[in-house]
Amino acid sequence: MSGIISVTGIFYVGYLLFTAILVIRILLDNNSPEVSVAWLLSILFLPYLGAILYILGGINWKKHKILKHRPEITSQEELGPILSRQKEIMGSLSTTIDNDIAKTITLALQSSSAVITMNNFSRLFLSGKELFESLISDLEKAEKSIHLEYYIFRSDEIGNRIADILKDKSEQGLEVRILFDGVGCFSKMSRKFKRSLRESGIIVKYFLDPTNVLAGRLLNYCNHRKIVVIDGDIAYTGGMNIGDEYLDGGSKFNSWRDTHVRLEGEVVHMLQSVFLSDWINSGGEALENPKYFPETETTTENLPMQIVVSGPDSDWYSLEKLYMTIIMNANRVVYLQTPYFIPSSSLLNALETAALCGVEVNLMITGVPDKKIPFWVAHTYFDSLIAAGVNIYLYQKGFLHSKVLIVDDTISTVGSCNVDIRSFHLNYEINTVYYSRKITAELKESFKTDLEFCIKINDIDRKKENVLGHLRNSIFRIISPVL
């Protein structure tokens, strides 16, 4: 008995020492107070489990880079012509744009190396049906290469339809590469489906493969990006993955509302650069070759755009800073659409401050959640937002998965980034930023259409919620920074 007690005692003392080391590590990381407190409470109230969760997802990888190649600093040679025109473009824009837009462009450029391109064309998609029709048409016309990068790619009806096209193209001799996120696609594809892709000659890689022992410790860092690049000429990006739910809502929802974009022009080179960087980081070969960056035809659109990326090991949390800057610079109106709303204290303050300054701030989140805990936590921010004058809407028609920010008449962004700490700090994300009255007007119109299917939350509704519900929500908010 004494031997058992001795072993148990040694194990317990070892755990206490290990916990003390983790506590010191959390304090020395100098994260935001809410993140540090959340991890400390997790370790305190979830013995053993809290420590494991911190090791998997709490280590500050800004000090210990996860990836060797980052899209912010790769493909510089291939992007040479575009990079060399940055001063010229900025000079020409300085006479036609206001100071707030100039600051946003500069922030994205300095925090994410997001070069600005002008010779572009863009088309918006507000439903999966329209998107997949266009995507399938472009894939069938591909002549040289197809690069796909998805957080989720299901082996369901639409997934198999797209896969069949990819397999046909590969067998015709085209270069076809697919990059799946290891966590997002886990259990989403059958073994037969994955085997058929490889047997057709498609090169398939996983970003941080969950079955890889070395990558397993990094499972909390997902590649949430959605990218398709066809022949280096056409690109798709935004909020939609590959799955039947984007067409009919799936088994859980009546419908699925999302936003995606199709791009042509110089901006496609930016998407290609991101894919090639992620490909190398996932064990793929280096593909820095001019053939993947063909010369673009001149368009009459003259559409200024930037591609902003962010990740846990980026020098800056670029997308969080982008959102804050855009909101703080708003003069008249803000439209913000996101399925999940767990803002950092800084972003929450930006929204409240904008509203208190007299800006019309409109926040729309899903009212029919796929995940209960983030939905509950979102409610804990409503009281202060409503008090500041923010209009809060819950979308009721189906699941709202759209990630859009629109400010005034000229600045808007569409992408993969949710308004939560996971997207801002832990995931690899990508957003398209537009400086266009036309695109902004289209996105505003879609937001106003979505309002027809929303209920507005007010302080009376908040007071009707029962105490237990408030308590439950508040408890989960404590650990929300690490969800």
Image (cartoon, rainbow, N blue to C red):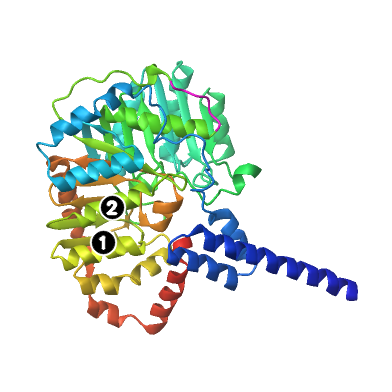
Residue 346 in picture, x, y percent from top left: 32, 62
Residue 259 in picture, x, y percent from top left: 28, 46
Q: Who's the residue at 67% across and 63% down the image?
A: 18
Residue 94 in picture, x, y percent from top left: 13, 37
Residue 5 in picture, x, y percent from top left: 84, 74
Q: CA distance from mark 1 to mark 2?
A: 9 Å
Q: Sort mark 2 into few (<14), some (14-19) or many (20+) by Cα contacts within 10 Å.
A: many
Sequence order check: which comes first, mark 1 or mark 2? 2
Residue position for label 2: 323
Q: Is residue 409 magenta?
A: no
Residue 81 disc label: none
Instruction: Tell me the quadrant of the picture where the N terminus can be found.
Output: bottom right
221 horizontally vs 249: left or right? right
Magenta part of the protein: which range?
283-288
Query: In this view of the protein, which residue sits in the foreground, 371 or 351?
Result: 351
Secondary element type, mark 1: helix
Residue position for label 1: 350
Residue 86 sits in quarter? top left
Name the kind of residue labelled 2 in the image. Tyr
**Residue 129 visible to the viewer:** no
Name the kind of residue labelled 1 in the image. Ala
